[in-house]
Every structure is written in C-alpha cells, then in structure tokens.
Amino acid sequence: MRALAPRAAAPQRQLRWQAYDRFQQQLLAARIRPGQFVSQRELAALIGLPLGAVREVIPRLEAERLLVTVPQRGLQIANVDVKLVRNAFQLRVALEKEATAQFALTATAAQLDALEAAHRDILRRAARRMSPALLDAAQAVDWGLHDTMIDALGNEIISSIYRVNSLRIRLIRLDRVTLSTDSLQPAMEEHLSLLAALRARDPERAIAAIEAHLTHACHRALGL
C-alpha cells in the first residue's frame, strides 16, 4: 500500500496543475474578473474540471493572493486596489532591475535584433491604423520583452515568482490598465530606449530605462 501512494498522488497533483493552468487561462481571457464572486461549483464549471480539482487548487490560489474565501459569499477573485497595484509593481521593479542588468551583459545580438524588429513592426502598423487586434499584438510584444529578460536569468524560483506576479498585473490590466491608442506609442518607444541601452551593454542605463518604463505603467494603473 505504501508503494502505491505516490502513484495514486501523481494524478491528483496533475489535476491540481491542470486546474491552476485553466484558472490562469480564464483570467487572461477576461472570463474571470477582479473582485468577482464565484462559488466552487461555478468555478469548476468555468474551468471544466471536477469540483474536487477546484477544492485542491484553492489553497494555492489563496496563498498567491489571487482569490480569497469569503464566508457565506464564496470565492472572491482578487480585488484591484491601490495597495495591490503598488505591491505588484514594486515586486516587478525589484525583479526586473536584476534581470535587466544581467540581460545587458548576456543578451545575444540575434535576441536584441528580434525584439527590436517586433517593436518597430508594431509602431509601423500603429502609424497606419489602430485596431483591437494591433493592441493585443502590442501587449504580447510588450510582455514578451519582460518575460525574455526574466527567463534569461535561468533562475526557476525567480521565474515562478514573476509569473505569479504577472497574473496580478494582468488582473490590474483587466480592471484599469492596458495598452491603449494613447499609450501604445510611448510604451513601445520606452522599450526601444531600453533595447538601445541593452545593445550598448550598459547595465546602469538599462536599469534606469526599465525603472522609468515601469513607473509610467504603475502611474497609468493608479490613474496618475
């Protein structure tokens, strides 16, 4: 019986991971909204998994502050407030300053070429016509640069912490901040300034560029 326990636990762990992954997908697709109340059964139906899988994943989601159990009301998706915005962006700055400094020294020319080309393509398309599809593409390019720098550290712990925080940032995005027709060009140009510092292999200049970029994003989230 003892020998069978790990085998029996494996499918359960897999189900928990699947439930967590599907929760993320629903969040990114805006089918789960900040501050929303859902029952365990409603969440199970939303992610298309058994109620037991939802109950298994709830402690992890609560530990990561992505939802909270409210007595007699059910589960509440993390509510976006000033504290969440400031905390999430403060963590982003701390992680990305280190990642940016290292990327300035380790990024290959091919990586920088590809990142710059993607940003310039967005700006060329924006000069012709804005559209919801273009804003989505710009958002993907925006996150792609940040994710690339974080993952280049080769530190799974940092990448994991960063991914969880990214979900909080995306909650903020759903509630109050995203790239818009007004912010798309400045955001892309801020990234190009960062890429120029990375090309120059100048960590201090790159850190200053990422701090300025994230400060502007935080201010947009706070409505400043």
Image: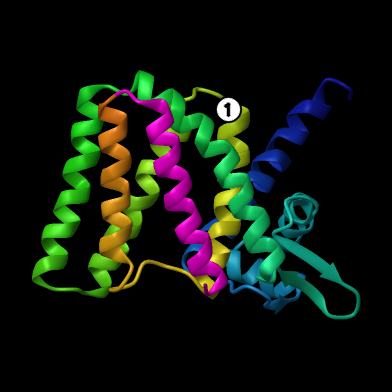
Q: In the image, residue 45 lies at what x, y percent?
A: 63, 71
Residue 175 appears in the rendering: yes
Residue 18 appears in the picture as rendered: no
Write the residue at 25% across / 69% down: 133
Quadrant of the rendering where the N terminus is positioned: top right
Q: Is residue 193 above or below residue 26?
A: above
Q: How is the image coloured?
A: rainbow
Does the stretch in magenta take in 69?
Answer: no
Above or below residue 68? Residue 5 is: above
Q: Tell me which residue sits at (51%, 35%) in the image.
A: 97
Q: Regarding mark 1 in the picture, which secondary structure is present there?
A: helix
Residue identified by numbered label 1: 156
The secondary structure making up most of the magenta span is helix
Give percent across and percent down for residue 129: 13, 73
Image coordinates for residue 32, horizontal then vertical, percent: 58, 71
Tag 1: Cα neighbours inside 10 Å, few (<14), some, or many (≥20)? Answer: few
Q: Position of residue 2 (x, y in %)?
A: 89, 22
Magenta-highlighted residues: 201-224
User: Which residue, as the protein is rendered here, is positioned at the far left?
Assistant: 128
